[in-house]
Image (cartoon, rainbow, N blue to C red):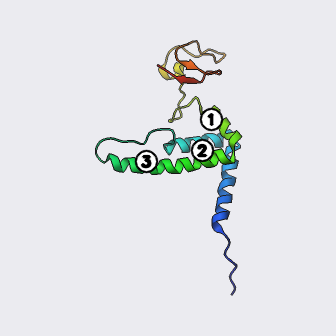
Amino acid sequence: MTQEPKRDSGARSRVNNELVIRMLMAQPEGRRWLWDKVADLRVFSTTQQFGENASLTTAFLEGKRSVGLALLADMTRLCPTEYGLAVVENGARNDHGNSTSRNRSRGSAPERADGADDDTSGDERPGGTVLWDD
């Protein structure tokens, strides 16, 4: 019984992972799923904790963040154009997947039919993306 020469399973795995990321980034649903995973891995939030066992919790969260940063690096390296789309598509959402629009989050006046926002507080980019809100 002869055995096949061992193939470089690490390289094959890397190529498969890159293919999966490219496939996910090609579709809006895939970009949203990846964005949610990166957010769940604390890439867009702080990991610093305070109180009892804070150093252990912070270390655990930094480990999660490290995985998220590696995924984010692959997304930007493999699919820079689609990553830009993901930023635009998910820019109006916070880490919990909720819209950050002032009208929806504060329960104030209903949205206009044309999608415009009558509220002028805060600084906005063209297209209504809020840079900060008071």
Is 92 situated above or below 70? Answer: above
* Element type at mark 1: helix
Name the side, left or right, on which 31 lies relative to 99.
right
Q: Amino acid at mark 2?
A: Leu
Q: Residue furthest left?
A: 52
* Element type at mark 3: helix
Q: For mark 1, does the 10 Å Cα neighbourhood hold few (<14), some (14 to 19), or many (20 or more) residues?
A: some
Asked if the residues shown at circle 3 and circle 1 are in contact, with their CB atoms under 8 angstroms apart, the answer is no
- Quarter that holds the N terminus: bottom right
Question: What residue is drawn where x is 59% and y is 24%?
Answer: 129
| Marks 2, 3: nearer the viewer | 3
- Residue 45 lies, in percent from the top left, at 47, 38
Q: CA distance from mark 2 to mark 3?
A: 18 Å
Q: Amino acid at mark 1?
A: Val
- Residue 16 lies, in percent from the top left, at 67, 58
| Marks 1, 2: nearer the viewer | 1
Residue with the mark numbered 2: 34
Q: Amino acid at mark 3?
A: Leu
- Residue 72 lies, in percent from the top left, at 59, 45
Residue with the mark numbered 3: 61
Write down the quadrant of residue 4 in the picture: bottom right
Q: For mark 2, does the 10 Å Cα neighbourhood hold few (<14), some (14 to 19), or many (20 or more) residues?
A: many
| Badge 1 or badge 2: first in the primary sequence | 2
| Badge 2 or badge 3: first in the primary sequence | 2
Question: What residue is drawn where x is 59% and y is 15%?
Answer: 117
Question: What residue is drawn where x is 67% and y is 64%?
Answer: 12
- Residue 51 lies, in percent from the top left, at 29, 42
| Badge 3 or badge 1: first in the primary sequence | 3
Residue with the mark numbered 1: 87
